[in-house]
Amino acid sequence: MQKEKTLAGLSRYIKKSPKWYYFLIPIIAIFLIDGIILRNLDALSFMSILPFIFFLLLDALTIKLTNKKFNNNRIMYLDFISLTLVTLFFWIGVLLYPVIRMPLYYILALAIAFPAFLRFLVLYIYYPSNIYLAATLSMNYTFSYIIIALIFYDISKIAIKFIIPLIAATVIYVLFSYIFLVFTTIGFTRKYKSRPSELIDFFLNRDNEGAIGEKFFTHVYNKKRQIPVITTNIRKENKDLVTLVFPYVHPGPFGNLCTSNLPVKISSEMGRDNIMVFHTATTNSNNCSGKNDIKNIAESVKDSIKKMKYSDTVSDFVKFNVDGYDVSLQKFGNSGISAVIPFKKQFDDISIDAGLKVVAALKKNGAENFALLDAQNSFTRDAKELDNCDMIINPLIEKFKATGSTYPAIIGYARNYEKIDGLASMGVQVLAIKINDYYNVIVLTDSNNIGREVIKMARSGVDKRVKNMDIYTTDNHVVNVSELDINPLGMHCEPQVVADLINRTVLQAIEDASPATAGTYTENITVTMGEENAFHNLMEIVIASLRKAKYSIAFILLISILVSSFSFRYMVLHL
């Protein structure tokens, strides 16, 4: 998926603001050019410098009092853009003076009103439930000029020819800004029964993960679907060593919403932390809507543990290459798990239909239970989804039939957590399986993908008794919140720290290895998730709205300028 078509990318785009000190030199430059044009220090002070200073104070007071999440950098950024718009409008009016023959105060007033159009677009997002407050705050530049004018000029001389027309022009800009918003987002509102302003406000302030996000995503993920939940439970001396869970739901979209942070949610429902929740063949369309789905998954795991039959044998770890993809296979008795791993060809997520087709083929050819995983262990920005796995079906069936569970199940498990950027609360989990005098190791990191550098470092430093080590991730989207973007493990932290944590956990799992039994069972449950391509459809509607905005804003701005100009001229001439 292209980077502009991801929710994380959208959040990052709309949330970040430059630091205030970046604007100091441009502001000084604007005032110097204004001084050259006006050629009068008093005029420069009254018409440019003092109104802007008062404008800053007015915005800082009114916006900070009414919306604490609109921080100082955002206020300064918005005010700088407002100043720039006023200045450019004014400069263009001065250059066109020989043609339009407007008085200087007329040009200045139209310039002062102009930023209200953009300011309303921005502030409407931060005040989605109070359009009147957003409209009022969008006119703060106009108010600052009026206050300065009232202080230094005779109101009887400027009220009719300046103040009243200025307010009227500003209101017209705000009105056209609102019309622009409604026109460009009507498709979104009809489809999802939510205002885009509410959703964007949620992106901007994702620490507030309550009603707005839940309300919106119930309209995105609202289709009932039956999905399999495969459970492999490993026991020692009649006690659960670790439970491997393979739910065919996706751990997103982000934060703690829906099925994001899925591993810890299932762990909490189960009441234990020795749970490994793997990322199956699913995409963002397969996120589920809420808590009931998590409970259903956890209940299916509990039921599966009660029903499964245990075996004391496992297979060796098998890995082979098909059409540019690596494919792994590990059997527990006559059940198996297999991961598809990018090799020469990169991908991000496997479609659920493609994955379940593989599962059905393996079960048809002798597997009692089978789970297909997306390893999510080769981060590549903008990689596309894999929507066809037919090429691996026959080779995988052949490997499954040829690979026997002929080795005693000597298994160890370990889990460790450190506070590392990109690592969620389930940390690093390791399953070590002893085969003769060596170990095969499956590592699961609770992260949204992982960098190849981390995997390379971990493999180079792993215990010499390890013959095969595959590192998979949970694809947990909760870790993206802090970075406002995709945050694979190793990108925003020291890779060696992660590699060392992995290898320390591997060593502990090896030391824990002892005779065990393993059972696998599949439960089919009904969950509420998105229809196929639901996530893509959401982003397409967002992009369509932006596209409509791109092509309509010039026209609507021109109309608003003309209407403001005519209204101003009418009031000046007739009041």
Image: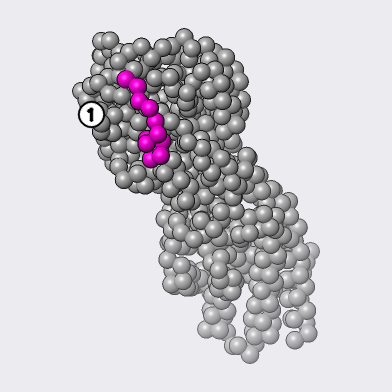
Can the viewer see residue 388 in this picture? yes
Is 345 on the left or on the right of 117, as rendered?
Answer: left
Pinpoint residue 352: horizontal percent, then vertical percent. 57, 33
**Three-letter amino acid code of the residue under disc 1:** Glu
Pinpoint residue 162: horizontal percent, then vertical percent. 66, 80
Using the rendered view, name the quadrant where residue 180 is placed: bottom right
Q: Quadrant of the N terminus?
A: top right
Magenta region includes residue 412: no
Q: Residue at x 68, y 57 (%)?
A: 190
**Residue at the spot of label 1:** 237
Q: Quadrant of the C terminus?
A: bottom right
Q: Which residues are magenta?
A: 302-312
| Residue with the most extreme bottom position | 156
Residue situated in front as seen by the camera: 325 or 554: 325
Pinpoint residue 172: horizontal percent, then vertical percent. 70, 72
Q: Residue at x 53, y 35 (%)?
A: 282
Pinpoint residue 101: horizontal percent, then vertical percent. 77, 69
Residue situated in front as seen by the camera: 306 or 93: 306
Residue situated in front as seen by the camera: 569 or 243: 243
Residue situated in front as seen by the camera: 162 or 245: 245
